[in-house]
Image (cartoon, helix red, strand yellow):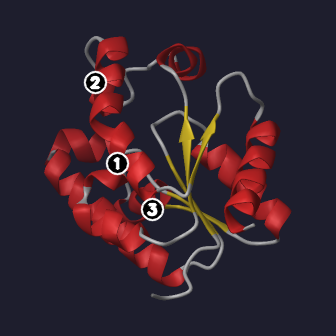
């Protein structure tokens, strides 16, 4: 296994992986990378456009490749897209790595994101769809993670501190 990232964040859309990841990178003296941003940069278009134009299977393949490249080359803090854990190869790649699952409840998701229709997987009846996505993914997030940190009613700084504490406890 390559050295890879010092910390990997997984969790649903809107949970704060990007914000918390950037804070953690700063605190740890590392760089920050987001695989969704990698995909947008490589494709020259937003993720919602990729979903609409090319479909979810095409996006998931781009995501699988982006995650593999980042895990293989990025030594800092890495945030993965919400659905990255759906891929069995990605889950295998994350095994044994310092992965933290950032979680939140549906009410928190509504508060943070408004469950905006700009999220392609939440375009119709967003509250129900978010719950269904979480039912399908929660076990995958917990499968790959060394620790789970709830983000509900916490500031990004509080979440970052909890992530650091969780990993320190796991290594103790």
Q: Is residue 132 left or right of residue 160?
A: left
Count of numbered badges drawn on the protein? 3
Q: Give the labeled residue for mark 1.
A: 140
The quarter of the displayed image where residue 139 is located: top left
Of marks 3 and 2, which one's residue comes earlier in the chain? Answer: 3
Q: Which of marks 3 and 2 is in front?
A: 2
Callout 2 environment at 10 Å: few (<14), some (14 to 19), or many (20+)?
few
Q: Is mark 1 on a helix, strand or loop?
A: helix
Q: Determine crowd level at label 1: few under 14, some 14-19, many 20+ residues with C-alpha closer than 10 A.
A: many
Query: Which residue is nearer to you in this view: 40 or 165?
Result: 165
Say whether marks 3 and 2 touch (CB < 8 Å).
no
Is residue 158 rendered to the left or right of residue 110? right
Residue drawn at x 78%, y 52% as measured from the top left: 165
Residue 169 x %, y %: 74, 58
Q: How far apart are the two marked residues, 1 and 3, measured between alpha carbons? A: 27 Å
* Residue 67 found in image quarter: bottom left
The residue under label 2 is 132
The residue indicated by pointer 3 is 41
Residue 29: image quadrant is: bottom right
- Which of the two residues, 44 or 84, is positioned nearer the viewer here? 84
Q: Where is residue 98 in the image (x, y as percent from the top left)?
A: 58, 66
Q: In which quarter of the image is the C terminus?
A: bottom right
Determine whether the residue tagged by mark 2 lies in a helix, strand or loop: helix
Residue in the picture at 84% in, 61% down = 27
Which residue lies at the image location 59% right of the left edge and 74% below the top edge?
5
Quote the CA–CA distance across marks 3 and 2: 29 Å
Closer to viewer: mark 1 or mark 3:
1
2 or 1: mark nearer the eye: 1
Question: Counting residues from the N terminus, which is met first, the one under dot 2 or under dot 1?
Answer: 2
């Amino acid at each position: 296994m390559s050295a890879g990232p010092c910390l990997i964040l997984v969790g649903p859309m809107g949970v704060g992986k990007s914000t918390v990841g950037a804070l953690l990178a700063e605190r740890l003296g590392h760089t920050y990378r987001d695989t969704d941003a990698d995909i947008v940069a490589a494709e020259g278009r937003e993720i919602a456009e990729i979903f609409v134009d090319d479909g979810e299977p095409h996006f998931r393949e781009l995501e699988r490749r982006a995650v593999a490249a980042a895990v293989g080359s990025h030594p800092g803090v890495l945030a993965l897209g919400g659905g990255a854990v759906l891929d069995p190869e990605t889950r295998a790649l994350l095994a044994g790595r310092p992965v933290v699952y950032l979680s939140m409840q549906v009410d928190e998701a509504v508060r943070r994101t408004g469950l905006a229709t700009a999220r392609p997987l939440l375009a119709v009846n967003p509250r129900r769809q978010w719950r269904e996505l979480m039912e399908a993914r929660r076990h995958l997030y917990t499968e790959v993670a060394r620790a789970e940190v709830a983000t509900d009613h916490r500031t990004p700084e509080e979440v970052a501190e909890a992530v650091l504490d969780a990993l320190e406890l796991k290594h103790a």
